[in-house]
Structure formats: C-alpha cells, structure tokens
Image (cartoon, helix red, strand yellow):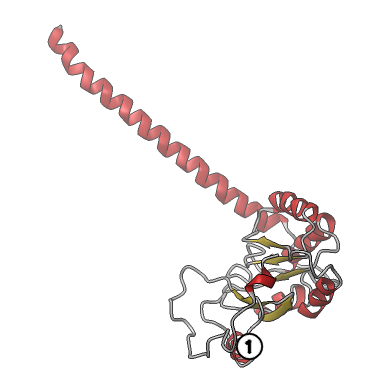
Amino acid sequence: MLVIATATIPLAAAALLGGVWLAAALAAFAVAALLAATWTVGWRTWPRSEVGVGRRLGTAPADIEASVAKGDPAAPLRIGVLGDIQNGISELADVLDAMRAAHVDFVLQLGDAANAGLPGRYAVLRRMFETHAPGIPVIAVPGNHDVGREWRHDVWRAWVGRPAWRLDVRGWRLVGLDDASGAVSAESMDLLAAVAREPPAACGTILIAHRPLAAPSDAGARDVPATGRGRSPRWASCRR
C-alpha cells in the first residue's frame, strides 16, 4: 500500500502541474481571442467610407501657428501628445477630455490614428475630437496602419492633411516626417533639406515620425545637412 501511495504522489503532482499549464494555455488563448475579436469589431463596425470629406481631422500648420500666436507669449507652450489610437476609441475620449481640461494649445498625434487608413475611420475620429476636444487644433504624421499596403496617402491627405509638414511656434520648430511605409518619403527629405538651410530655431527643432518596427534602419537614407547650425538656442527663454 505504501509503494502504491509513493508512486501515486508524483503522478498526482504531474497531473496538477499539467492542469496548471493547461489553464495557462487556455487563459492565453482567451486573451488572444479577445484581442482578435476587438480588432475584428473595429474593422467591421466602423463605416468603410463616407460621402464627402467635409471637415478635415487635421489642422493646417499655418492655422496652428496663428492660433498659438493669439495666446499669451509668456505662457508655457502646452502640446497634447497622442500615440497609436487604432481601435482605442473609448480611451481616446478620456484622454481628449483630460487634454481639454489641461488647456493644451494643440494636439500632436504620432501616427496610427486608425487601425486601417479608410475614410470611415477618420470620420469617427473626427467626431471624437470635435466632441471631446472642440476647437483644439490637431496635427499628425501618418503611421504604417494609416498608409499600409492596401491604403494610399490620398486618403490621409484628404481626411487628415499633408503627411510631411513644418510648424514654428514660440521659438520651437516641429518637423513632421513621413516614413510610415518604411522609407523616408522624398517629400520629407526635401523638407529636411530646406529646414537645414535655414538658421536654427531659437529653442530647438523636434523631428516627429512613426517608424515601422519592420523597416530597415537605413531605409530611404541620404545625406541631409544637420539642422541647428549657426547659433546656440536661447535656452533661458525656452524653459517657460
């Protein structure tokens, strides 16, 4: 009887351990299924198209510059920064409410505004911004989900704005670049070259881009003069 009990203990332990691994595997499968379902719901429930663009989600850089210029020049520049939104619409509402309460000067979106660059997705995003952050300008660079293999830049241009841009506000220079397809676009490289030929911004230059993880490190690279030559930034006037 003792021999049987001794032999049964490791078998029971093995069965218990196997049950733990099985439970862990089922839990992992459930999480993966939930994520896949969320992605599918986001894909299927958002309208794929909408007749007419109407109002763009994005704001022209010149309009943002004019809006910031109307404010108190001694006040700190407040930029609300948003990463990947994709299907996180409910979370976006909370973040925009917080940005509105913080009185940001404008919102900077860093790409992957939608999980697929289709007109209906941007129509939903535009509604969210107009509802939860009315009157706050928005500027963005495209991400790989915005201009992926099946979608082109024309949708982004029509619904959001130019994929490469420059913004000069209170001594800071922000340069939005388009490398969402892997290689840095020719438009972006030309913009960088033009910026490099000018005197540096008083406070500094910030480059914004959405680099796909799968993109090679040297994709689209070519020699461009370094920005910021000529004089040192006046940091004392930029700390506010």
Q: Position of residue 185 (x, y in %)?
A: 58, 84
Q: How many marks?
A: 1
Q: Looking at the rendering, in which quadrant would you find the C terminus?
A: bottom right
Q: Residue at x 56, y 77 (%)?
A: 179
- Locate residue 184 relative to residue 109 in the image: left or right: left
Q: Position of residue 203 (x, y in %)?
A: 65, 76
Q: Amino acid at mark 1?
A: Val
Task: Please tell me which residue lies in front, 133 or 226.
Answer: 226
Q: Residue at x 69, y 81 (%)?
A: 166
Task: Please tell me which residue lies in front, 5 or 87.
Answer: 87
In this rendering, the answer to whether 72 lies above or below 179 is above
Q: Position of residue 160 (x, y in %)?
A: 74, 73
Residue that protrudes farthest toward the front in the picture: 236
Task: Please tell me which residue lies in front, 98 or 161.
Answer: 98
Quadrant location of residue 189?
A: bottom right
Badge 1 crowding class, 10 Å Cα cut-off, few under 14, some 14 to 19, many 20 or more, is: many
- Locate residue 220 relative to residue 148 in the image: left or right: left
Q: Position of residue 65 (x, y in %)?
A: 79, 76
Task: Please tell me which residue lies in front, 9 or 97.
Answer: 97
Residue corresponding to mark 1 = 195
Q: Looking at the rendering, in which quadrant would you find the N terminus?
A: top left
Residue that protrudes farthest toward the left in the picture: 3
Q: Secondary structure at mark 1?
A: helix
Q: Residue at x 62, y 77 (%)?
A: 204
